[in-house]
Image (cartoon, helix red, strand yellow):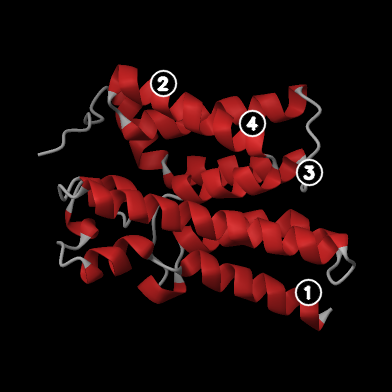
Amino acid sequence: MWLNLSVVLVVYMVGSLPFAIMISKIMGLTDPRQFGSGNPGATNVLRSGNRWAALLTLLGDAGKGWIAVELVTFGVQYSYLADWVSEVAPLVVAAGHIWSVFLKGQGGKGVATFIGVLLGIQVYLGLLVILTWGLVFAVTRISSLSSLCSGAVVSVVVWLVPFDMSSSPWAVIGLFALILYKHYPNLRRLMAGTEPRFKLK
């Protein structure tokens, strides 16, 4: 039991790593919380004008989600960890990103980590989110709408297609619920038609 709880705690700490802040500091960029939504994520790093920093942030945030799922899946597969750990780990690593202990409970919106987690659960789900996000963004230039649409699509598909996954569909639905909660202000602006479109200055 203690091993299981310790792993869950480690997963949360990994999810809490604020790559947007760390990479921006290393590269001498403005704090990404000064742009756009004010959240430390790849989109706001991109608004700083440095595409490489944004790409590294995206890879870091997605990577922590992927590695958490892969390590936990390995532990469950070889009976080091209980099965329930594979169900909660995706939610815990995303929660760590959204409510980072290193940022005093603040954090990003969890979309990149969501993608990384899905790539770990089932690679086709991760690719589906990436494709949907890219298509919606190409048409609308609205990051929040792209995130919500991609999360909604994968939440429906996971119930309709019998994927061989390392976690149950409930883990995916729970992840989308976290994304939806974090995007609530964006959702209200979308409904009011006041959500800004992305512009890189």
Instruction: Looking at this view, name the residue that lies furthest to the right.
Output: 79
10 Å crowding of disc 1: few (<14), some (14-19), many (20+): some
Kindly indicate the quadrant of the structure image that contains residue 196.
top left
Residue at image position (75%, 54%) is 87
C-alpha distance separating marks 3 and 1: 18 Å
Residue at image position (61%, 44%) is 119
Residue under pointer 4: 155
Image spot of residue 134 (x, y percent): 40, 27
Q: Are marks 4 and 2 in contact (CB under 8 Å)?
A: no
Question: Which is closer to the viewer, label 4 or label 2?
Answer: 2
Image spot of residue 143 (x, y percent): 33, 34
* Quadrant in the picture for the C terminus: top left
Instruction: Looking at this view, name the residue that lies furthest to the top.
Output: 139
10 Å crowding of disc 4: few (<14), some (14-19), many (20+): many
Give the mark, 3 or 1, whose residue is nearer the N terminus: 1
The foreground one among 18 and 88 is 18
Q: Amino acid at mark 4?
A: Ser
C-alpha distance separating marks 2 and 1: 39 Å
Instruction: Looking at this view, name the residue that lies furthest to the front.
Output: 52
Residue under pointer 2: 135
The foreground one among 28 and 111 is 28
Image spot of residue 152 (x, y percent): 56, 28
Q: Amino acid at mark 1?
A: Asn
Query: Is 157 situated above or below 78?
Result: above
The foreground one among 176 and 158 is 158
58 sits left or right of 131 in the view:
left
Residue at image position (45%, 74%) is 101
10 Å crowding of disc 3: few (<14), some (14-19), many (20+): some
Q: Is residue 151 visible?
A: no
